[in-house]
Image (tube, rainbow, N blue to C red):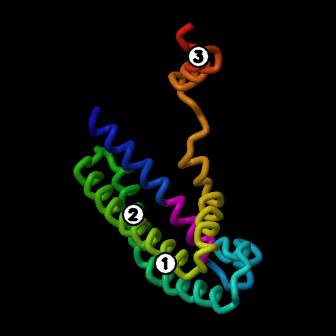
Amino acid sequence: MKRRKYILIVSLLFNAAFILSLVIFLVNSGDSRRRSRRFGSGGTHRLELAPETQAKLDSTRVRFRKELTPLWEEQRRQRSALHEILLKTPLDTQAIDVRLDSIGIIQTALDKKITRQLLLEKSILPPDKGDSYMRILLRRWGGERRFHNTRRDSVNTEREDLLRKDPPNNHRAK
């Protein structure tokens, strides 16, 4: 049972990280003119930045893509190796664990680099634009809904219903 939970959690983390990496890659790919039309230069086109600030962001993104490319390629190789292991009979669970651990290490490195890059980009922006930039990125990634879950569990719903019917202020001594 523990093993299943571990594999499920690792799998979910890999999927989320892969999607995040893909979004960042797509946002930062292509030449700056196509990117500004298609992806909004990583969201900065809405901020109306000075040309020198935009140029500085673009140059850091070029460096960043070059830095991440080897990690992405290694992650793809590890995932391919994992797929090959999963197709073999009988399954070698030890080899699967080794590949998952390798993929996890790479994914952690990618997540750290991506986070550092976002913080670097935010620091390049004028102070009044940095928070707006992060909000744009979170919206683009579905982050606001992902990080602020709009669904309510039954306990909260029942509690809120009770509070609406009988607010705490109605319990004054008479």
Between residue 123 and residue 66, name the one nearer to us: 123
- Tell me, for residue 120, which label it has, or none: 1
User: Which residues are drawn in magenta?
Assistant: 18-28
Q: CA distance from mark 1 to mark 3?
A: 47 Å
Q: Earlier in the sequence, mark 1 or mark 2?
A: 2
Q: Amino acid at mark 2?
A: Gln
Classify residue 108 by image quadrant.
Answer: bottom left
Residue with the most extreme bottom position: 52
Tell me which secondary structure the magenta stretch mostly adopts: helix
Q: Secondary structure at mark 2?
A: helix
Near mark 2 (Cα within 10 A), the count class, few <14, some 14-19 or many ≥20, is many
Q: Residue furthest top?
A: 174
Q: Residue at label 2?
A: 107
Query: For residue 167, what is the image quadrant?
Result: top right
Q: Amino acid type of disc 3?
A: Leu
Give the Cα distance between marks 3 and 2. Answer: 44 Å
Q: Is residue 139 above or below residue 174?
A: below
- The amino acid beneath tag 1 is Leu
Task: Specify which label sits upstream in the sequence, 1 or 3.
Answer: 1
Location of residue 162 with respect to 30 vertically, above or below: above
User: Which residue in the rendered view is the most extreme toward the right?
Assistant: 37
Which residue is label 3 attached to?
Answer: 162
What is the crowding at mark 1: few (fewer than 14 residues within 10 Å), some, or many (at least 20)? few
